[in-house]
Amino acid sequence: SFAWSNELMSACKSQMSNVDRAPKFDFDDSDLLPEDRDVLEQIAKCVTTGPLKGRALDLIGRTDARGDVEYNVVLGDYRAEAVGDYLARLGVDPNAMSRTTRGDLDAEGKDDEGWQRDRRVDISLQPTKTGDLGIAKR
């Protein structure tokens, strides 16, 4: 499940409309769903050979508010890792991806639909620094 930043959506000419239409993770799971792969293939193409070639990405794993805080932090991390691993298999430089977790810190869901929306990985472009080649330094 992926939320796209506006800059990434524009540059990649994606039909995704951020969080609402983004695919989601199943409850208590960090496995990519088949429908997630199409979105990731578009992102990988965009940052490996497309208009954002060489740009670095931030991957932020998120969970719904159910479960305890420590568990959700770990689960969010696993989700970001799953997305990063898949993007790496598609040719994205692992060193050009920052993986973090917010766990349930920003979760807003109060029902099944809201919880599903919370279970995602947000993907955004890292800011570039003047004079570099588009790869953000860590």
Image (cartoon, rainbow, N blue to C red):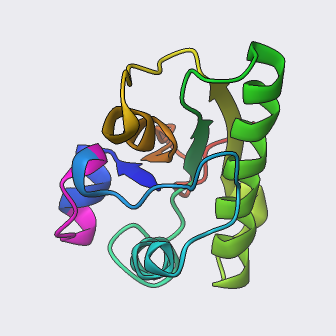
Residue at far front of view: 111
Is residue 80 magenta-colored?
no
Vertical placement of residue 41 versus 130, above or below: below
Residue shown at the point (47%, 21%) measured from the top left: 107
* Left or right: where 116 falls relative to 101: left
Vertical placement of residue 101 versus 53, above or below: above
In depth, the one of 84 and 69 nearer the eye is: 69
Residue shown at the point (46%, 85%) measured from the top left: 49
* Left or right: where 38 falls relative to 102: left
What's the magenta region?
Answer: 11-19
Residue shown at the point (83%, 18%) measured from the top left: 70
| Picture quadrant of residue 13 | bottom left
Residue shown at the point (68%, 50%) measured from the top left: 79
* Left or right: where 83 falls relative to 35: right
* Left or right: where 24 falls relative to 100: left
Residue 56 drawn at (x, y percent): 57, 54
Vertical placement of residue 18 versus 45, above or below: above
Tag count in the figure? 0
| Picture quadrant of residue 108 | top left
Quadrant of the image for the C terminus?
top right
In depth, the one of 19 and 72 nearer the eye is: 72
Vertical placement of residue 27 versus 16, above or below: above
Residue 120 drawn at (x, y percent): 50, 46
Residue 45 drawn at (x, y percent): 45, 82
In depth, the one of 79 and 58 nearer the eye is: 79
Residue 22 drawn at (x, y percent): 33, 57
